[in-house]
Every structure is written in C-alpha cells, then in structure tokens.
Amino acid sequence: MNSMTGKLFHSAIGYLLRLLPGTAFGQTAPTSHRMILERAGDLVKALADNERIFYLDVNAVFLNPDGSINQNLMPDCLHPSPEGARRWAEAMEPLLSKLMGDLLGNLAPGNEKGGRDV
C-alpha cells in the first residue's frame, strides 16, 4: 500500500443523513409514515460517533413552522424541488466542508500522522 492510499484509508470518514420528512400519499401534515421515518432517523443517529461517522439532520429545511411539509420545497411531499435541493445542499455544506477540510489537511505533504487524529 502506498503512502497516499494508507493516508486515505486511515482518514476514512462518513456522514449519515436523516431520512427526509416525506409523507405517504402526498399529505403535507405529519402522518404515521412520517413517524416511521422519524424512528428510523433516531436509529441511524445512534450509529454516529462524531469522530469518524457524523450525523446530520436537515429536515427543518423542508418543514413549515407547524411541522407540515413546505410544498414549494417538496411539491410531491417526497422529493425536493430544485429550490429544495439547493437549500438541502446549503444545509449540508458546513459539515461537508469541515470534513473535507480535515481530510485534505491530513493528506497534505509533510503530515506524518497519516490521517485524522482521533
């Protein structure tokens, strides 16, 4: 294994994204289907260790203050619109930038640690 491959493997990180707040049958208000997605999100969140595996919940982006789905951002109550996708990306950007910055910084020439210091 070459030095770069070793650094990449040692630096492996990932992130888990909470399931989007979709609803069954195009209903904007919370449903039992949404409750199942919420429970699944809680289970996934438990897998994050915030050292190598990170969790991110950006569902608030798609919700109105009353908890219903904003149909401008999720017109079919399941898939983001182009504007919803833009806002989704903006919500993920801070964590992804931090993770990429950490990874790229640890791959820099002269860094003998070979990866994240965890």
Image: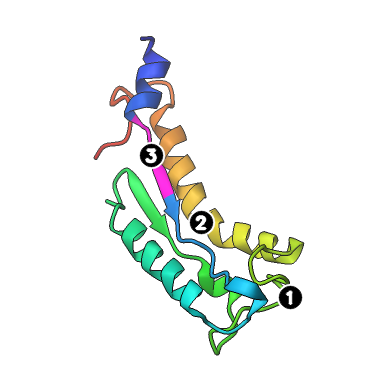
| CA–CA distance in space, label 1 to label 2 | 24 Å
Residue 46, compared with residue 105, is above or below; it is below
Which range of residues does the magenta coloring cover? Answer: 11-15
Circle 3 is placed at which residue position? 13
Q: Farthest residue in the top direction?
A: 1
At label 1, the amino acid type is Asn
Magenta stretch containing residue 114, yes or no? no
Position of 91 with respect to 98 (left or right) is right
Position of 35 with respect to 50 (left or right) is right
Q: Which residue lies at the image location 66% right of the left edge and 62% below the top edge?
A: 79
Question: Helix, strand, or loop for circle 2?
Answer: helix
Mark nearer the N terminus (3 vs 1): 3
For disc 3, the neighbor class at 10 Å (few under 14, some 14 to 19, many from 20) is: some
Mark nearer the N terminus (1 vs 2): 1
Residue 110 pos. (x, y %): 37, 21
Q: Nearer the viewer, mark 3 or mark 1?
A: 1
Residue 48, compared with residue 7, is above or below; it is below
Circle 1 is placed at which residue position? 72
Residue 42 pos. (x, y %): 34, 65
| CA–CA distance in space, label 3 to label 1 | 33 Å
At label 2, the amino acid type is Pro
Question: Helix, strand, or loop for circle 1?
Answer: loop
Magenta stretch containing residue 14, yes or no? yes
Q: Which residue lies at the image location 57% right of the left edge and 69% below the top edge?
A: 22
